[in-house]
Amino acid sequence: MHYTHSLVDKVNHNFKINCLVIMFPQHYEAEKCALPPGSKRKELAEFPTVTKPRMLAINVIKNGTIFLGVILVVVITYHSYYTLESPVIFKRVNMGMSKLDLLWQYPHDKNRTKTSEILNNLSLNISHRSDSQCDIDLNSRFDCAFNEVVDMMKCQARGCCWNPAANAGSPHCFLPSNYPSYHIDYLSPTSTGYTASLSRSKKTLFPNDIMTLQLNVMYETSGRLHFTLKDPRSKRYEVPIDVPNITEKASTQLYTVRFSSRPFGIIVQRKSNGLVLLNTTVGPLFYADQFLQISTSLASKYISGLGEHMTNLILDLNWTQLTHWNRDQGPHPNANLYGSHPFYLVLEEDGKAHGVFLFNSNAKDVLLQPTPALTWRTIGGIFDFYVFLGPDPKTVIRQYMDVIGYPIMPPYWSLGFHLCQYGYLSTDITRQVVANMSRANMPQDVQWNDLDYMDKRKDFTYNLQYYGDYPQMVKEFQQKGLKYVMIVDPGISSTQAAGTYKPYDDGVKRGVFIKNETGQPLIGKVWPGPTAFPDFTNPETHDWWYKNVKEFHDKVPFDGMWIDMNEPSNFVTGAISGCPNNNLEYPPYVPGVTGGSLTSRTVCMSGEQHLSSHYNLHNLYGLTEAIASHDALIKVTGKRPFVISRSTFPSHGRYAGHWTGDISSAWNDMYYTIPAIMLFNMFGVPLVGADVCGFRWPTTEELCVRWTQLGSFYPFMRNHNALHQPPQEPYVFSESAQSAMRKALFNRYMLLPFLYTLFHKAHTAGEMVVRPLSFEFPQDPNTPGIDRQFMWGEALLITPVLESKTVEVSGYFPAATWYNLYNGSSIRSKGQYVTLQAPLDTINVHVRGGCIVPMQEPNTTTAVSRGNPFGLMVALSDQGIARGDLFWDDGDSLLSYESGDYTEIIFLAKNNILFSEIIHLNSQIDGLKLSSIFVFGLPSPPRKVSVNGFWITDFSYRTDTQVLTLQNLSVLVGEPFTITWI
């Protein structure tokens, strides 16, 4: 949509490049063609604007001859523009196709009457097709149905090709190869790259085509390319999130950029091998007021990302449509879920990787097809693309986080075990849950409450009948070393008498709510009944939110916030009073949203917010609430904030974590949480987890045991289930099940120093906490599709049981030596699957040779375990080398790393010596000791062991597993140490 602000930066007309005119090919390299002023061939650059006297005289003398010559050259060249084949060759991977239902037929067509009428009433007398332009390979066809059910007459009236005999999934109605697009009028160098003016001469079937565009290409870093397509005449909505702003072109690049002039296209290649990573010439560019489309080839079939959806790690290219429109929708295949992350990563066939990010918050579809190719469709904003060159997957993710921001450092206690259920109806019941966990000797750090604590489900209140001593209960938990978190929804009840509910009264006075077309608060319906929705893009709302959080915290000293229903969810369509009949509510194109309309289960698109309409800002709602809650908690507690949110958007990880929503208690749903956790780590949200044992439907004992084992390796671990479901706290099951769950929880607590160190690396260096095997072993062709296993950092490989009634599991082990976490037995793999024993009390975890994992003697809370002795697990490589590190601080202070208040230690093992190196030291490590060391992969028993120069006798060696064990040590962790075995 157009935005009534000042014009974008004016196009620089002082320098024009004539590589686009008569004598030059259709495609050309910008570096070779677009020459800066003052270079050789300056006269060519000046040709359109400078007329020299000598040339004028010649023209006067030879006017007739020159005129005829020019006409002849123009005719020939014009013909050449449209017949020359592109010299760009890009790599394609042929894929087999399986039968799928036609995805291009819109499943909710009955709900699209008004939008369909808009398209039907458009003038569709376009004719661009011919038999030759329609002779396109089935897998290379680009859809022209646009989520509508079309017949041959309607398809051809659009100027498109019709072939109902196409393969299943392939579009029946598709764009011809010569469908009108934009062309480049001129190209100029800038201080950061290039700028170009684009124009089109023919309109598309969508209303309000923008006939002239401005392209800006910015060589931001050696591994990051940035380009935008904007309307040079009218400022359009852009995502209001800060991103890096560069002022000069990177001196070196891992990429080359080429352009196509007619039709316009941009081609990005990897400089090292020429591989085409992005090629938008494969399809026409659409840029209308409410419909933007651009297509590109893909460098391989291994593409991940584009969440939030219930998918495998590697996306299906067989005519898949992924819709980005945040919705209150429990995880379900083929549905748009709670968050939108328009970022993808492609694993190239040689092990390299690259990523692409579309910085756009409007509703959109992403279409994948077997070519392989991808099409972006969005209904507002601008095209704002980043391309990340890696060259390896982990570097791509860091480059992406360089743009969206590095994740927040969570408080240490938040990595412990969290427990909740919707249905803890009183403080007595909640207290009993905590007491039962303690009695069963189950680790627990955080107790939660769902809506049950509220008075009539209103924010910032508590029920005096059943939660009358609520503040006292929270203080009791904190005295026991626990933390407390409660749910807060964005919807503010609007039905109370004036003066009886301060959050609403003050909100109305301060104008903090989303407004309807009359300027009054837009009223929807959520848990408390009729509700208003805060506009978190308004600075006034942030202050209002903070004051409500503070006043409630003054009564109930909670430790963190769980912000739910923030897509935002709405139990009526749009508003209680309905929505206006306009092009925001009924745009010409509706992405494939569940429910069939943009307002389904949310508020009106015409809702007025501080920065723009809800039409533009909808996908940012959860993020903006997370920012407001993050900022409020910092002011209120003075400590590191803990916020868990359901709705997300890029940069969310800077402020909060995420849980994957209302997952079902089913084995298949448990499996899908693994790719979900890995994907959110790719999206820069490492503090992520799923509801252990499932949220919807009754769980089973076996499922809950296996899920607790898996969940003990989620970065964020919470057991939570729905109202009226059977209880699923660990203590309600049989003794054998409790024992298995207890073992899993204690193993998690043992590994928390390692997990906390991984979060530090994510926070400071853009690393991933959880990662796919393919990110650690990109050269291994067997790893890209593996998503039933995952890794913690580079050191731990987790292989969970994901099926019922089984006590063994098959796992893939990339070429390396891997050691069993529990006994040190080794697997020396050449890159193979191994069948592992997996009794009900065991989840298989292996340590990668070459790594050192810090650990700590566990207890039932982190408050206690943080004071316990440390241990080191030293997993030697085949060369007898290992490395690891530890980050340690007080666990909840703000900016401890930034202010230098932390300890960082590196551990190294080589040549039969293990030693530590203190990188940075603070007092938090004082008095903490190293009491045990396990050296895996020692080929022969040592005769002697010394600690800091003193020989010791308290060590043992197992010849069957080749493990050296040192116990009862008393080595200060905060001082350098050396341990030798000979």
Image: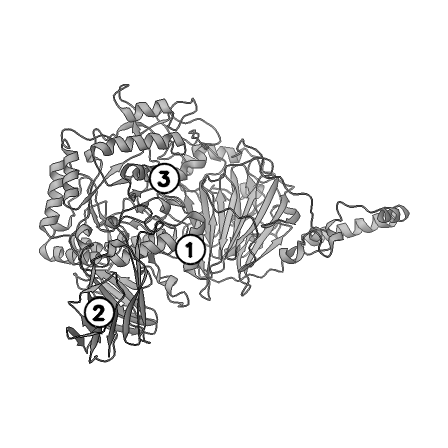
Name the image colouring. one colour
Query: Which quarter of the figure has residue 420?
Result: top left
Say if mark 1 contacts mark 3, CB within 8 Å.
no
Q: Secondary structure at mark 1?
A: helix
- Can you see residue 202? yes
| Position of residue 172 in the picture relative to residue 432 (left or right) | right
**Along the viewing direction, whichever of 908 and 586 lies nearer the viewer:** 908
Q: Between marks 3 and 2, how big is the CA–CA gap?
A: 43 Å
**Along the viewing direction, whichever of 437 and 616 lies nearer the viewer:** 437
Q: Residue at x 20, y 52 (%)?
A: 862
Q: Residues within 10 Å of mark 1 (few under 14, many from 20)?
A: many
The label nearer to you, 3 versus 2, is 2
Marked residue nearer the N-terminal end (3 or 2): 3
- Residue 976 is situated, as x and y percent measured from the top left of the image, at 27, 65
Say if mark 3 contacts mark 2, CB within 8 Å.
no
| Position of residue 436 in the picture relative to residue 318 (left or right) | left
Q: Secondary structure at mark 2?
A: strand
Q: Residues within 10 Å of mark 3 (few under 14, many from 20)?
A: some
Q: Between marks 1 and 3, how big is the CA–CA gap?
A: 22 Å
Which residue lies under the disc numbered 1?
398
Marked residue nearer the N-terminal end (1 or 3): 1
Which residue lies under the disc numbered 2?
934
Query: Residue extending furthest top?
Result: 498
